[in-house]
Amino acid sequence: MALDQATKKELCKQAAAVRKFAYAPYSKFPVGAALLTSTGKIYTGVNVENISYPNGICAERTAVFKAVSEGEKSFPAIAVVTPNGGTPCGACRQVLAEFNWEMLILIGNPEGEILRETTLADLLPEAFEPGQYQLS
Ligand code: THU
């Protein structure tokens, strides 16, 4: 699914806008994500930290779990905005690969502009994803 420029911009804009809801009192690194469904909906997510540090969750996984909880499973693209142009962590890449290993990944800046476009296949080569899994 080729994405038009307006949709890409909208995803980055929403990922930047939702950062204000990030709960990141420990890292002070607010992250926002905006996940597109093939039905045209956008689910946003933020990182939600916890005083018991490992129990926090990243923005990307929040967005995926929100969307899947509402019946969505087809995700052509996600936009991610961190304070510094960072890319999704390894755990988030794995969770995204569950649904679309070729997902478009847009990296935006806090102003909502597109900094970079890449794909999950580039960020997570040779992923262990459902297409590879066979019971013998
Ligand atoms: N974080 C995300 O939400 N997404 C990423 O792609 C990278 C890291 C969060 C986790 C933690 O709350 C904070 O950023 C610092 O690592």
Image (spheres, grey):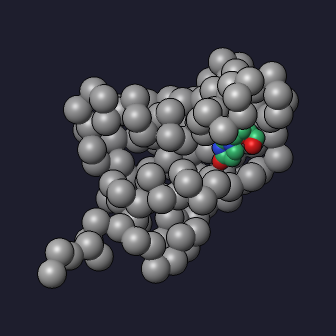
Res 112 seen here:
no
Residue 29 relative to residue 41: left or right: right
Q: Where is residue 63 in the image (x, y as percent from the top left)?
A: 47, 34
Q: What is the total number of numbered labels drawn onto the structure image?
A: 0
Residue 103 relative to residue 22: left or right: left
Q: In this view, does 82 lie above or below 126?
A: above
Q: In this view, does 7 lie above or below 120?
A: above
Residue lying furthest left in this view? Answer: 136
Residue drawn at (82%, 28%) of the image: 26
> The N terminus is located in which quarter?
bottom left
Q: Where is residue 97 in the image (x, y as percent from the top left)?
A: 41, 60
Residue drawn at (28%, 27%) of the image: 70
Residue lying furthest top in this view? Answer: 21
Frontmost residue, 90 versus 55: 55
> The C terminus is located in which quarter?
bottom left
Res 106 seen here:
yes
Q: Where is residue 119 in the image (x, y as percent from the top left)?
A: 52, 65
**Looking at the rendering, which quadrant does residue 134 occupy?**
bottom left
**Looking at the rendering, which quadrant does residue 129 occupy?**
bottom left
Residue lying furthest front in this view? Answer: 52
Residue drawn at (23%, 32%) of the image: 71
Frontmost residue, 39 versus 24: 24
Q: Where is residue 13 in the image (x, y as percent from the top left)?
A: 62, 33
Residue drawn at (62%, 44%) of the image: 80
**Looking at the rendering, which quadrant does residue 42 occupy?**
top left
Ligand 1 is found in which quarter of the picture? Answer: top right
